[in-house]
């Protein structure tokens, strides 16, 4: 990084409300930090309150080179109140295709309470798991035949979807 | 050798087992609760599987999830550590039925030694003394008198349902026996809703002396020099050392051979510990056998140079003992202090929270086994041990000096620890003279409590 | 990551409510951090600037039970631009009374540049130290015969006092 | 025994000396620069005195302030550690004249061994081989040929003013000698402005083998098993081990006795080290003697169980050696890795800053000597060593495995360290086979550099 680059950085930084910037390459490390305390409008502060540490970490881990991906994930997370995650309470192998080759559920399916949605294989026993909620499957997060641990997210469910539909159906 | 071992435990012992596996070139799988996501055993292992929420009943004791974790990770053995499932015969059985090697003795050995009455019966067969006393409860005064004169005064009357000193009476002579039994019975009735009592010979100021043994599948068993674990609080060991000032070479051999005999009686394979009470006249009595690796195994590792966890894994795999009894020698004196997250000033009440600052002792003759680090959050769900601080030196006096300087160096901020308690013990004149019996803490450190 | 990419990042970051971002790839590390919040009134910011960690520590070390003392010390420190501290550059025993029993200086004295103000005894040698500043001795911080280390404060000097007086004297 | 010792040093060695003093019941005074206000040696000592600003020329080398600190604190002895004033005869003299015991050998011994030419003269008297070569510089080609044929080819031509390979030529036969001298002379002239060169026998792929010795005032001297310090970068040792794979019992005795003979020649009291180069045919040559405790002393402590710093203090006080030569035995194999704040990927450029996260290895067979902790700021003023990580195991193979797992456990965040370098070495097939000579790093690890 030369002086020219540095200048443009500083200008860029000055125009935004980014406060700190660290750039490291081949052992060269450049760090910028703006003065503390700056007229940030109230509404921005409010927005900030919504970003939690856990989420930040996740975003950081993702490959930021794919910007659309980043935006979509961020969108999902900002919208997380809308969706419900079904997590595994058992350790084992996740199956969505039953032994008779039928697929139990797929993305886009509406599921109801008590519906068989997946199978966990543990200690050579297949255990069928039924849903405790109703809604639409937005995403299936684990592939058939993969191992899952306790607390691992399996399905992303939009619980409002079927409510509306059910409303119509009734 | 095993290809991959799942460690069904947490804390320092999980880290300890991973260390042994790494040095043996065996892959490791850590299982952990949600409260232990950032734990060192998770960080140090090759793979990790979350098996449940914080409370151990739902995670570290969750047999289906642990077995399933072994299956999905392809582990060919499970090391149970100590506590949790380490002496659970059902777990050992499930492992066996799933084709996973349980790293410990056979389930029959665990069963035989786990039931105290059964264990004593076996041990008596081997002509090893157990504390004499009534077979079951006593009721009739005449029967009691007869037994007492047989096992000789002083005797102690204990509540069958009891604990914590309630319904307990020491009797010095026959004239006091009748009254003592009646008081004990009514105290026991009041405290536990069960008035049954039994009688044992009363051992005055005994020491807790235990022998580490190792056995292989050919039936060969060796013992390591004894550990003296007399510094206890409510039957919880706090300080262990090796060798014991109360055991000379002749007694060591006698007790060690007794320990080996017991192990042979149950065809013991892998590592285990035979615990004795030792009275002031060098009489010793079998108390129990621990069929697992113990917290204080590291004391014996320090004085002998033997890596007990590696040996345990090797022996469980079916290898033979690779050391002869006469090659096992003590290279000095080792002391271990258990550093617990407890407040010694407030009756050892557990302390949880975040460790804000940590400086570990170092330099010559120091060993630390711990799972904590600066920034570590001590979860409220598990036992309170934070670290084992061990020292080795040429003799007991030198080891105490070294422990004192190590305790002084040890900085753990953010939570209360038992470091001040250990400093008090190391300073205590009776401890320094080696006059330590199982009542040491209540008699010498906090007599008022 | 080149400058172009960085620019778009910064813009992106500025538009979102993401607060912190770390990007690492092949040894290149870029970290952004936004301002922490903030319309702090100007006067408060100024006050903040004055409290340094070092000073805080010293105040904490003092016996706070004596509140007057604390206030006066704090006052002194807030006023520190006014006063100058003479520190020891040697390790040794501090003497303000010379071997012929005369006291070299006392509190309230005006001292001038080059004036012998104290003696350090080190390796059995007495070394006379002269002042490099002029002013009035507000406080002598070490007792005669006490040991001092490098950097230890010995005198608190009000450098303006003699200037005024000298003004008069001239 | 001494009542109070001032430690004229910093970092791990200052902490190490404080540990020895504490175990001996001796009070300690730490001296420190302003950059070391929060250092562990300041925290662990009984008293501390600030002696100057960060740069060591104004603090740790400030003799008047150090002596004065000893006087005001009433210290009766000064331990100089290593580096700084440890081999400064003037400092030793000032201590003496002020009635403060300098913990080291006599100033005559330091002087005799400090001057390399003088040292070689003394050593030759003791019939111990030094590297053959010219007494001074060489100029005439005939003179050079004569010498070379006497000491036998290959020979090496070195710049008198030199270093870093400039003005250096290895010559295999007489036909190449003339040219080599001329090239070396002109290279030396260009590089150092001084064209003088000298000749030495060229030792191909030597090992650096050194012997720790201890001497008392009665003139008795003992040696400890050798240390192999061949893993060096620009004459800086990075890894040390004991014993050496290249030294058998017979050679050990021969070299150890030579080391003792040298120590006796200068009436050496306290601890010191005699360094040799060892060629592939078991010929060894005296290189120099270090008249102080060394960084790598801990390697010998681990294998022998002897506390060298305590012995050093005892011997300096005038006590006699309390161990006989035949009782000094190796109890296994020890390896030390120096963990430096340097970036091995960028030619070992020093790295300073704050240690943001620290996890220290632990468990069996690990020793750590360090002055760092989580939150510690590495000052830019001093040498870059952060920690010495040592392991002990039954044999070399076991020690390497243990070092690998310890290096894997060692987490130091916030600054660059040499941990990745050490991991690379432990993985290296030549290192594992023990084929390690002083050119190991350039030949086997980074041949391109």
Image (cartoon, coloured by chain):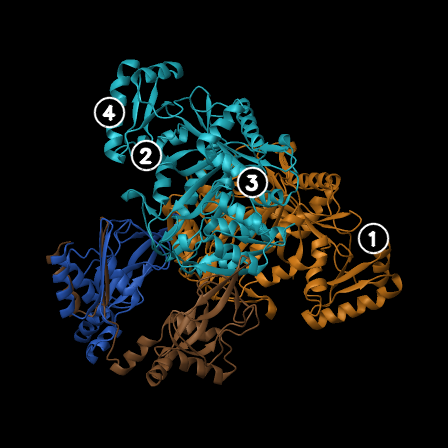
Chain colours: A blue, B orange, C brown, D cyan
Q: CA distance from mark 3 to mark 4?
A: 43 Å
- Label 4 near label 2: C-beta < 8 Å? no
Q: Quadrant of the C terminus of chain D?
A: top left
Q: Which of the marked residues, 3 or 4, is nearer the chain's N terminus? A: 3
Task: Please state if B72 lies on the left or on the right of D254 as rendered.
Answer: left
Residue B140 is at least partly visible in this image: yes
**Residue that appears at 31% across and 52% down:** A94
**Residue that appears at 31% across and 17% down:** D172
Taking depth in this image into account, of B110 and B313 the one nearest to the observer is: B313
x and y, in percent, of residue A79 in the image: 21, 70
Q: Are marks 3 and 4 on the same chain?
A: yes
Q: Tell me the crowding category of disc 2: few under 14, some 14 to 19, or many 20 or more residues within 10 angstroms, Cα based.
A: some
Check disc 2 and report the residue beneath it: D163
Up-down: is C31 above or below A134? above
Q: CA distance from mark 1 to mark 2?
A: 85 Å
Taking depth in this image into account, of D68 and D380 the one nearest to the observer is: D68
Mark 3, secondary structure of its residue: loop
Check disc 3 and report the residue beneath it: D105
Check disc 1 and report the residue beneath it: B151
Check disc 4 and report the residue beneath it: D183
x and y, in percent, of residue D427 in the image: 36, 36
Q: Which of the marked residues, 3 or 2, is nearer the chain's N terminus? A: 3
Q: Are marks 3 and 1 on the same chain?
A: no
Residue depth check, mark 3 versus mark 1: number of the one nearer the observer: 3
Taking depth in this image into account, of C116 and B43 the one nearest to the observer is: C116
Q: Tell me the crowding category of disc 1: few under 14, some 14 to 19, or many 20 or more residues within 10 angstroms, Cα based.
A: some
Task: Please state if B249 lies on the left or on the right of C81 as rendered.
Answer: right
Residue D449 is at least partly visible in this image: no
Which of the chains bears the disc numbered 3? D
x and y, in percent, of residue B273 in the image: 62, 46
Q: Are marks 2 and 4 on the same chain?
A: yes
């Amino acid at each position: 990084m030369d002086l020219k680059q540095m200048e443009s950085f500083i200008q860029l930084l000055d125009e935004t409300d980014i406060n700190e910037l660290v750039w490291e390459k081949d052992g060269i490390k450049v760090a910028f930090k703006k003065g503390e305390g700056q007229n940030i409008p109230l509404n921005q502060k409010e927005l900030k309150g919504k970003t939690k540490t856990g989420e930040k970490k996740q975003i950081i881990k993702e490959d930021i080179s794919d910007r659309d991906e980043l935006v979509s994930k961020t969108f999902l997370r900002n919208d997380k109140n809308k969706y419900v995650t079904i997590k595994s309470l058992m350790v084992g192998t996740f199956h969505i295709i039953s032994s008779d080759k039928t697929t139990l559920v797929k993305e886009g399916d509406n599921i109801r309470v008590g519906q068989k949605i997946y199978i966990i294989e543990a200690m050579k026993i297949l255990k069928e798991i039924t849903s405790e909620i109703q809604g639409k499957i937005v995403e299936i997060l684990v592939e058939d035949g993969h191992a899952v641990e306790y607390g691992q997210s399996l399905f992303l469910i939009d619980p409002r979807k079927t409510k509306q539909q059910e409303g119509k159906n009734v | 050798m095993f290809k991959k071992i799942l460690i069904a435990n947490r804390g320092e012992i999980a880290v300890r087992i991973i260390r042994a596996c790494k040095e043996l070139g065996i892959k490791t799988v850590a299982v952990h609760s949600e409260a232990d996501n950032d734990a060192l055993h998770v960080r140090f292992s090759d793979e990790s599987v979350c098996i449940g929420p914080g409370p151990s009943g739902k995670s570290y004791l969750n047999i289906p999830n642990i077995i399933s974790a072994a299956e999905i990770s392809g582990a060919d053995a499970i090391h149970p550590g100590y506590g949790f499932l380490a002496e659970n015969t059902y777990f050992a059985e499930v492992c066996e039925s799933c084709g996973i090697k349980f790293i410990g003795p056979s389930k029959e050995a665990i069963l035989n030694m786990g039931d105290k009455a059964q264990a004593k019966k076996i041990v008596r067969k081997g002509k090893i003394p157990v504390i004499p006393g009534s077979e079951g409860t006593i009721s009739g005064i005449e029967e009691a008198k007869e037994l007492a004169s047989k096992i000789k005064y002083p005797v102690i009357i204990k509540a069958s349902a009891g604990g914590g000193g309630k319904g307990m009476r020491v009797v010095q002579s026959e004239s006091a026996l009748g009254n003592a039994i009646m008081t004990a019975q009514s105290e026991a009735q009041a405290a536990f809703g069960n008035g049954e009592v039994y009688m044992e010979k009363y051992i005055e100021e005994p020491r807790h002396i235990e022998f580490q043994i190792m056995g292989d599948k050919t039936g060969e068993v060796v013992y390591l020099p004894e550990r003296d674990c007399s510094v206890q609080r409510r039957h919880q060991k706090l300080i262990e050392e090796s060798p014991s000032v109360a055991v000379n070479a002749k007694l060591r051999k006698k007790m060690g051979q007794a320990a080996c005999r017991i192990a042979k009686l149950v065809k013991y394979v892998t590592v285990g510990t035979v615990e004795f009470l030792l009275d002031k006249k060098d009489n010793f009595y079998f108390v129990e056998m621990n069929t697992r690796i113990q917290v204080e195994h590291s004391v014996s590792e320090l004085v002998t140079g033997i890596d007990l966890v590696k040996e345990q894994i090797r022996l469980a795999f079916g290898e033979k003992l690779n050391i002869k009894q006469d090659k096992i020698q003590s290279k000095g004196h080792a002391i271990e202090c258990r550093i617990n997250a407890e407040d010694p000033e407030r009756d050892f009440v557990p302390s949880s929270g975040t460790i804000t600052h940590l400086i570990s002792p170092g330099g010559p003759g120091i060993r630390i086994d711990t799972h904590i680090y600066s920034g570590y959050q001590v979860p409220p769900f598990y036992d309170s041990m934070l670290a084992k601080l061990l020292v080795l030196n040429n003799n007991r006096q030198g080891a105490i000096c070294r422990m004192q300087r190590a305790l002084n160096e040890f900085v753990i901020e953010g939570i209360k620890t038992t470091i001040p308690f250990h400093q008090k013990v190391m300073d205590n004149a009776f401890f320094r003279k080696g006059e330590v019996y199982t009542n040491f803490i209540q008699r010498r450190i906090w007599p008022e409590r």
